[in-house]
Amino acid sequence: MRYTNKLYRPLAALAIVATALASSSLVSCSRSGKEKPKIGIAMGSFDDPAASAIRRSIETEALDKAELAMIDGQNQQNAQDLQINSFFDRKLAAIAIEPIDGSAIGPIIAKAKERKTPIVFFDRLPSNEAMQSWDKVFYVGSSEAEGGKALGEMLADFWKTGPAVDRAKDGVLQYAWLGEDAAEREEAIDKALSAAGIKSERTPGSETDAIICEDLKSTLGALDAHKGAKKPAIFAWGEGDPPQAVMDALESGALAGAIYADAASQGKAVFSLAYALARGTDPAKAGWSISDAKYVWVPYLKFRAKAAASGR
């Protein structure tokens, strides 16, 4: 999940904020009692499926523990800025933010530090400089390098199933990547294959041993284009809950495997840290491993085909 929309529409943004603030109490997850801390959750967009999965998890975790002010930025950074300012004005105990534009992170942290309001960022990773600028800034997300390693290990297992998977009969696992370049992820895939003693090569086109699809659209397109015997193995990469179409393809064996970010666990971690910070307790005791006193890295989930794919 990455948002790059930098449109600035002040009037539209004000309308978004007014509507969101008017309805934020409707998503409160507190049933009674003023002792429950008030926590602001600034989502990038409610329409994003992966973000929605994280949001549902946060709301579930917050039941009977905290009051949430949950606001939809509608993928507009200027709207989200105004919404976050409203959190500061309301003196909420802590804020969790899915930033829309990375350039907004520094000013947000500066204001949070001034107001002494702890922040948990998620999805978009702030720069190291931003993370180190205050001791009450944390991050929850999944490491693309770790996800790439997991996918590389899955590819290695596929390659070791037998000589039939080597379509070119050249002893080299050739794979295509459908989607935007992701250097960190691809490097991790190649390292995992190398560690397994497998020679690999990324190639264009479909005449490969395996195809890795970065999103649902490319996954469905690859499944549609490659049917029957002797087709390349198809692997999916995604965020949030795996769509039913992906699960069905895994069940039938049409899809060899999938790697998905664990949105439910990310939501749990976001709330756990924000809740600890809101209560003034040690986030290191919130039940999650914190790296470098700042980061909670949630492992990707691995899904494997439940039936042998045709021709392999």
Image: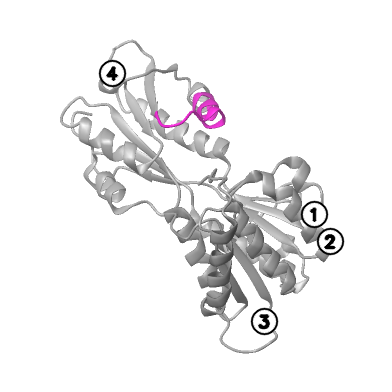
Q: Quadrant of the C terminus?
A: top left
For label 4, the SS is loop
Q: Between marks 1 and 4, how big is the CA–CA gap?
A: 51 Å
Question: Does residue 267 show up magenta in the picture?
Answer: no
**Residue furthest bottom in the image:** 33
> Is tag 4's residue or tag 3's residue first in the polypeptide sequence?
3
Q: Amino acid at mark 2?
A: Glu
Span shown in magenta: 178-191
Q: Amino acid at mark 4?
A: Glu
> Label for residue 21?
none
Q: Position of residue 121 (x, y in %)?
A: 65, 54
- Answer few, some or many: residues within 10 Å of disc 1's Cα (few below 14, many 20 plus, some between 14 and 19): some
> Label for residue 207?
4
Q: Between marks 2 and 1, how big is the CA–CA gap?
A: 6 Å
> Is tag 1's residue or tag 4's residue first in the polypeptide sequence?
1
Is the C-beta separation of discs 1 and 3 under 8 Å? no
> Label for residue 114?
2
Residue designated by label 1: 110
Q: Between marks 4 and 3, how big is the CA–CA gap?
A: 58 Å
**Front: mark 1 or 4:** 1
Q: Position of residue 147 (x, y in %)?
A: 51, 39
- Answer few, some or many: residues within 10 Å of disc 3's Cα (few below 14, many 20 plus, some between 14 and 19): some
Residue drawn at x 47%, y 60% as measured from the top left: 46
**Residue furthest top in the image:** 170
Residue designated by label 3: 36
